[in-house]
Structures are given as C-alpha cells and as structure tokens.
Image: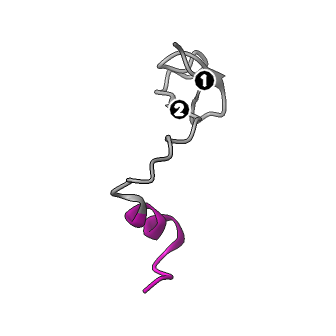
Amino acid sequence: MKLLKKCGCGNYSMRDECPACGAKTFSVHPPKYSPEDKFAEYRRKAKYGKQGE
C-alpha cells in the first residue's frame, strides 16, 4: 500500500523521491495514537515547551 508523501519543495507524490527536485519525501499522515505511548511526554515538551514544570 502506497501512502501520500510530501517533499520540502511543497510537491506531493507517492514516490520516495520528489519527481520535481529529487529530494527525499516524508509522510504527511500523523503517527498512530497509542494510549501506551512511552514518549508522548517528551514529544509534548519538544513541541509546546516546558509548561508543565
């Protein structure tokens, strides 16, 4: 199953490399949610700062 990917130049593709610029593409879909996520606390701190401290 191929997923939609995006390049840094803004183009969308299903390839691993952008057909326009040749750069590596990345997934546009968010990671799956898991209530047992061991690293969620660290991701929230990286994204929103150290608000909870």
In the rendered image, residue 42 lying in the magenta stretch gets the answer: yes
Where residue 12 sits in the image (x, y, percent)? 65, 25
User: What is the crowding at mark 2: few (fewer than 14 residues within 10 Å), some, or many (at least 20)?
Assistant: some
Q: Residue at x 39, y 53 (%)?
A: 37
SS assignment at label 1: loop
Q: Main secondary structure of the magenta part?
A: helix
The amino acid pointed to by label 2 is Ser
Q: Residue furthest front?
A: 35
45 and 9: which one is in front? 45
Dot 2 or dot 1: first in sequence order is 1
The residue that label 2 is drawn on is: 27
The amino acid pointed to by label 1 is Leu
Q: Relative to 15, is 45 above or below?
A: below
Is residue 34 found left or right of 8 in the rendered image?
left
Specify the quadrant of the image occupied by residue 21: top right
| Magenta range | 41-53
Q: Residue at x 66, y 33 (%)?
A: 10
The residue that label 1 is drawn on is: 4
Image quadrant containing the C terminus: bottom left
Q: Residue furthest bottom?
A: 53
Q: Residue at x 35, y 58 (%)?
A: 39
What is the C-alpha distance between the residues marked 2 and 1?
A: 6 Å
The answer to the question of whether label 2 and label 1 lie on touching residues, with beta carbons closer than 8 A, is yes
